[in-house]
Amino acid sequence: MLSKGIVSACRFAWRYRFFSILFFLVLCLTSVALAERLVIEFSTFIQQMQQRYGANRVTVARQWQGMLQHAAGLPEQQQILVVNDFFARTLRYQTDIELWKQNDYWATPLETMGKGLGDCEDYAIAKYVSLRALGISDDKLRLIYVKAQLPGTRQTQAHMVLGYFTQPNAQPLILDSLIVKVLPAAKRTDLSPVFSFNSKGLWANNSTQSVADPTARLSRWRHILEQTRKEGVKW
Amino acid sequence: MVSVFKVLKRKRNKTITLKQELWIAILTVIIIGFVSSLLISTSSAKEYFTTELRMKNVDNANSLALMLSQMNKDPVEIELLISATFDTGYYHRIELKDPQGDTIIKRIYRGELTLNAPRWFRHLYSLNVAPGIAQVSDGWQQFGTLYVESHSEYTQDALWQSAVNLFYSFLAVAVSACIAGAYFLSKILSPLSDVMKQAVALGEKRFIKSKVPRTYEFAKLVTSMNQLSSRFSRTVKEDRRRLEEMRFKSQHDDLTGLANREYFNATLDTFLQNSQAHGALFLFRVINLDALSDQVGRVEMVSFLRRFSESLVVFLESNEDSFRESQIARMSHVDFLVLFSDVSELKTLSDNVLNIHKQLVAEFAQVELGVSHSCSLIKADDTRGELLTRVDQLLKIAIAQPGCNAYINDNVPVHQEHIDADQWRTTIETALKENQLEIALYPVSSFSGSLLQQQISLSLLLNGEKYRFGFYYQWAHRLHLLARLDWSLMKLMILEYGDSEDESILAIELSADTLRDDMAVASILTGLSAYPNLAKRLCFEVRAGFAVKEFSLFRSFCSQVHCIGAKVALKRVGAEFTKLTKIQELGLEMIKIDTVYCHNISFSEDNQTFLRGVCSLAHSLGIKVVAEGVKNPSDQAILHSLGFDGLVAIEERVG
């Protein structure tokens, strides 16, 4: 009798404590996840989209935000497919010379989605940012310079793709702008890799809050990273 | 503990000059400029070096990684390539890690470097350069991550070197800035000392003018002060003119301009009060003056009288060497008196003046004019009445015969005086030699009873008797011993008051002998400058007669005295006061009006008017006015109402 009384008395307190512990765990997990993943301030991103490309392009930004929120709960393999699919649907391929009147221009995700157009490295950059925002580690992602053989010819072309490594020493999955499918590297006999990079070591002293470094503009890749920071991507 | 507190307090109270303040400001600016430019330059150099090193790291890492990615992944080949890069370049570390994070190859510099930069500098300006990181791939696969770090010690050395260079060049700039600052400061402040001198002079009641400098603010200041000074000098000039007119009217005969009976009586009284009075009195009478007026005309009579009084003045001036004080007066319509001090030989004087008068009378031959005179030596115990009666009696004998006659009474034996003189000399010199001296104090107090100053004089002690200053002054003066007495008094005073903490003012008279001797004045003032507290309390007194006669000497004496912080007062001020031009430039502390003017003041309306004017003029310049030797309470009350500040305690009158 006595023990039953105590249990009933304690029940309320236990439930209360249970919720508070759960809340704490969720907080810890999210903060760990947050530490891994790239944070994107969508309010800034959408506001800039509105300013530069008009209200109708804001829809694309909202779709992107929705896609990222939707994919957040999925396993990595599926996230890759969702992101690849999203950009294959949203963007159309166009060369830099037509789009930007420049020989080789690296556009930020905002510019790419704002125009709805882009070429190989614009696709790769947008996908890289999206996957990093979903929490995929930098170790597993590489932007890869490849030599692409055009189908049906012996002509080659400089091209860029995004590689996803399930294991650091495994063969990567290739996210390409030329084809919609995500295929393992071994199946892509038309591509031969030259050099790969990611954003590792770019931030001096692990300080992502460093003030705008004047040398950033000298490097194309650093320049993109700086630009995206202004557009709401918190590297 | 208390003394430390005192010192601190004094330091806090110590004023700072404008020049010092400007220097502090300049030095502060220069030091801030120096330190901040050094720090800013060094840290911006550090910033620059860091960026350059980082760029070098990143670039080299990427090009090496690119090369490795293209290569065969033969371990020996990779090791050779990395070693070659490391050995021929300036690297601190080149490391290749596989994707799991295990080191494949690592090269790190272990040599000892000889560095110039001191440890504290390296600690303060440690270059924190991030390594260059690049990915090496093997086909599609990851091969590893490459870390490249360059040497930063050399850079730190270069940074140190540049800091040292900057230090010296900024130091040179700072020093030249100081030199330029000193130059401009002296140029800017050069008028300041003049301005300050003038301001101090105004504070000391000396209303001088000075040259207007070029700097706007200073020019404004000096112009205003000059205006003040000139306004004062104008006022003073006008007041003085008015006073002189008034004084002259009150004391002189309208017709001849000689002193009148009232004034002469006061002078004679003062003269006779002196126990050692010594001199002669001449009485002249013009006979048949009215006949001249009746027979020829009043105009002729007036011109005769003027000629006659001129002759008396000429008579005085021609014998100027033989006396110190003199006075001519018209006592009545036909009677004239001449007072000499110090003379003892009457015959020659009498003959001289008789000759002059004979010639004068001869010019007015149409009337039987005559000028007779009598004269008598003054005895020490004479009163005014006795003396006047005596000369009158003598004159009666002289005019018993017609024409110009003279009757002399030199009954005081001449040799007696010499004996006195020798005695006095021995007495005074003995007292000085044996140091038988004592200070006598005469308080000068205001009408409300507060002490204005203490007048100091020297008493001689001999054979148990005390000889006051008034008693021996005449003889000391005649024997030229006053300078020595002044010096002894000064020594005695320093001995007695040198270390005193008291702050009442001490007034001390300096004789004309001392003042004329540059060396004596210099030694007195230098002696005093060792006792700044005493010097601040001192007020040197100079007789007004001397101040007028030797004005430039007196003026320079005033400025010297002001330099050591002491004050100057005038003593025995009377008729001379109106002759003191530029009194506004002297910075006087006090004037002491002579007894002649204050004596029986209640009976003389004219003197009252004159003294009221003197008081208001003196007060407008910040000078105090006190009266000497007034005993009568009703006189004292009137002096108070005239604006006098106080009275000198009665002392024995001196010549």
Image (cartoon, coloured by chain):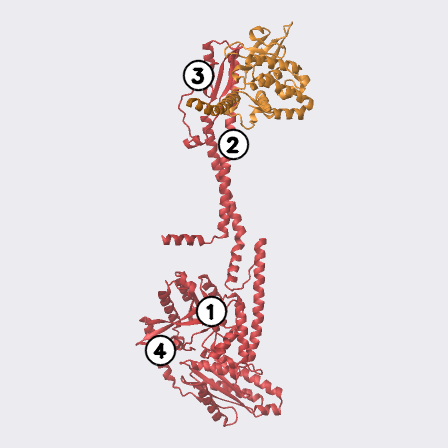
Chain colours: A orange, B red
For the residues labelled 3 and 1, the Cα–Cα distance comes to 100 Å
Circle nearer the viewer, 2 or 4:
2
Residue under label 3:
B106
- Residue A220: x and y in percent read 59, 21
Relative placement, left or right, of B369 versus B498 is: right
For the residues labelled 3 and 2, the Cα–Cα distance comes to 33 Å
In this rendering, do the residues under marks 3 and 4 share a single chain?
A: yes
At horizontal 51% and vertical 64% (from top left) the residue drawn is B205
Q: Amino acid at mark 3?
A: Lys
Circle nearer the viewer, 3 or 4:
3
Which numbered dot is residue B44? 2
Q: Amino acid at mark 1?
A: Ala
**Number of numbered markers:** 4
Residue under label 4:
B424
Dot 2 falls on a residue whose secondary structure is helix
Q: Earlier in the sequence, mark 2 or mark 1?
A: 2
Q: Earlier in the sequence, mark 3 or mark 4?
A: 3
For the residues labelled 2 and 1, the Cα–Cα distance comes to 71 Å
For the residues labelled 3 and 4, the Cα–Cα distance comes to 118 Å
Q: Earlier in the sequence, mark 4 or mark 1?
A: 4
* Residue B482, picture quadrant: bottom left
Q: Looking at the image, which is closer to me, B45 or B480? A: B45
Q: Amino acid at mark 2?
A: Ser
Q: Looking at the image, which is closer to me, B340 or B455? A: B455
Q: Amino acid at mark 4?
A: Trp
Residue under label 1:
B569
* View extreme (top): residue: A152
Q: Earlier in the sequence, mark 3 or mark 1?
A: 3
Q: Write down the chain letter for disc 4.
A: B
